[in-house]
Image (spheres, grey):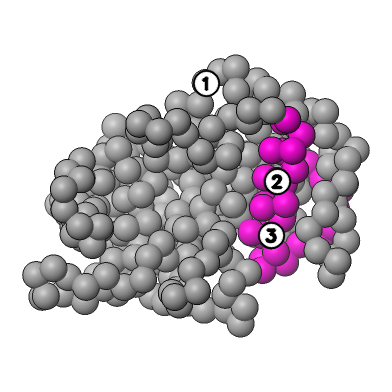
């Protein structure tokens, strides 16, 4: 679903802050016993799902840069917040959250004294699996995090002491956590470090649905603005990459996706980059091939 606001300039360093502000607002408006997938708290003993309710910022800059690829009916509604619901969220919780959003029309949202308040507008239901238009027949769709993806952990030593944890490992882990049910090992006996490396290896394997290219560290002046939560003992790290996702069990070429530590609250939103097929080199192990300039 989307919740629209009146036009106010939002900078990329404010995406997480505004998403957190809306999240707190929705929890307060919900009242008693908010949905576990909204607050991220579950009854002890119940397996946590891979993803909770996520909030992303679809601002005017996104509309300007990616309006051609956004579905027309979505682009016309922007700017707004995109509230992404996990597929296993109970129907009654989905309906309650939608009702909360509809009742919020006309209310103001506060983030910081340094920026104007937002006045919330209409709410609308959209199909998040079809946020983007289908890719043209002669093109291949890749993705890039906007504005960046925050690493979910510090660099992890390799238990076998043969490899180093780089930006690529951070991105593979981020992808593995989004698709946790498929890529995260079920064995809970090993150390956290060993499980992280197992996840990285699974996502990086030739049989996986993912490839990453040109993965690199990126930084901003105030990195803390881009993170959902921080640990004083860890240095915040961010990365970007060109990400290819194969169809696997179903195409995600049109879906709303996000990766990284702040993927549930304003960070790591994946935007499409469509390349002509004549710029792609075939790869026998991966249907979407490899960009020729990165081969």
Q: Nearer the viewer, mark 3 or mark 2?
A: 2
For residue 287, say whether it is visible: no
Assign the magenta stretch its main secondary structure. Answer: helix
The residue drawn where x is 51% and y is 53% is 263
Can residue 118 be seen here? The reply is yes
Q: Residues within 10 Å of mark 1 (few under 14, many from 20)?
A: few
View extreme (top): residue: 92
**SS label for mark 2:** helix
Left or right: residue 104 versus residue 291 is: right
Q: How many marks?
A: 3
What is the residue that sits farthest to the front in this orientation? 44
**How far is mark 1 from mark 2, CA to CA?**
21 Å
- Which residue has dot 3 on it? 17
- Residue 283 image position (x, y, % from top left): 19, 55
- Residue indicated by mark 2: 24
Which badge, 1 or 2, comes first in the chain's sequence?
2
- Per the image, is 141 magenta? no
Along the line of sight, which residue is nearer the eye, 235 or 174? Answer: 235
Marks 3 and 1 close (CB-CB < 8 Å):
no
Q: Which residue is mark 1?
A: 90
Of the two numbered discs 3 and 1 on the same chain, state the one appearing first in sequence.
3
Residue at the (10%, 75%) spot, across then down: 162
Local secondary structure at mark 1: loop
Separation (CA) of disc 3 from disc 1: 27 Å
Q: Is residue 275 above or below residue 218?
A: above
- Magenta part of the protein: which range? 3-31
Q: Position of residue 250 (x, y in %)?
A: 34, 32
Q: Nearer the viewer, residue 203 or 275?
A: 203
Image point (69%, 38%), residue name: 27
Specify few, some or many for label 3: CA neighbours under 10 Å numbering under 14, 14-19, or 20 or more: many
- Which callout, 3 or 2, points at the residue further toward the start of the chain? 3
Report the side of 293 relative to 201 (left or right).
right
């Amino acid at each position: 679903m989307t919740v629209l606001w009146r036009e106010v300039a939002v900078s990329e360093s404010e995406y997480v802050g505004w998403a957190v502000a809306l999240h707190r607002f929705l929890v307060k408006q919900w009242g008693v016993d908010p949905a576990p997938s909204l607050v991220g708290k579950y009854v002890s003993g119940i397996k946590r799902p891979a993803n909770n309710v996520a909030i992303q910022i679809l601002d005017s800059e996104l509309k300007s840069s990616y309006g051609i690829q956004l579905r027309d009916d979505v682009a016309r509604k922007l700017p707004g917040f995109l509230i992404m619901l996990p597929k296993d969220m109970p129907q009654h919780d989905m309906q309650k959250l939608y009702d909360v959003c509809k009742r919020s029309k006309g209310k103001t949202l506060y983030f910081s004294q340094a920026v104007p308040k937002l006045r919330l507008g209409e709410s609308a239901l959209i199909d998040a699996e079809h946020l983007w238009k289908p890719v043209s027949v002669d093109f291949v769709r890749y993705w890039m995090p906007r504005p960046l993806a925050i690493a979910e952990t510090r660099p992890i030593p390799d238990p076998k002491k043969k490899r180093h944890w780089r930006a690529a490992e951070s991105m593979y882990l981020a992808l593995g956590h989004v698709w946790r049910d498929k890529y995260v090992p079920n064995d809970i006996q090993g150390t956290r470090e060993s499980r992280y490396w197992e996840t990285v290896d699974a996502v990086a394997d030739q049989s996986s649905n993912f490839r990453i290219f040109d993965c690199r560290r990126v930084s901003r002046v105030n990195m803390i603005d881009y993170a959902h939560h921080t640990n004083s003992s860890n240095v915040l790290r961010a990365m970007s990459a060109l990400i290819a996702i194969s169809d696997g069990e179903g195409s995600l070429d049109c879906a709303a996706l996000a990766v990284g530590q702040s993927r549930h609250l304003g960070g790591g939103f994946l935007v499409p980059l469509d390349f002509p097929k004549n710029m792609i080199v075939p790869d026998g192990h991966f249907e979407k091939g490899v960009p020729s300039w990165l081969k």
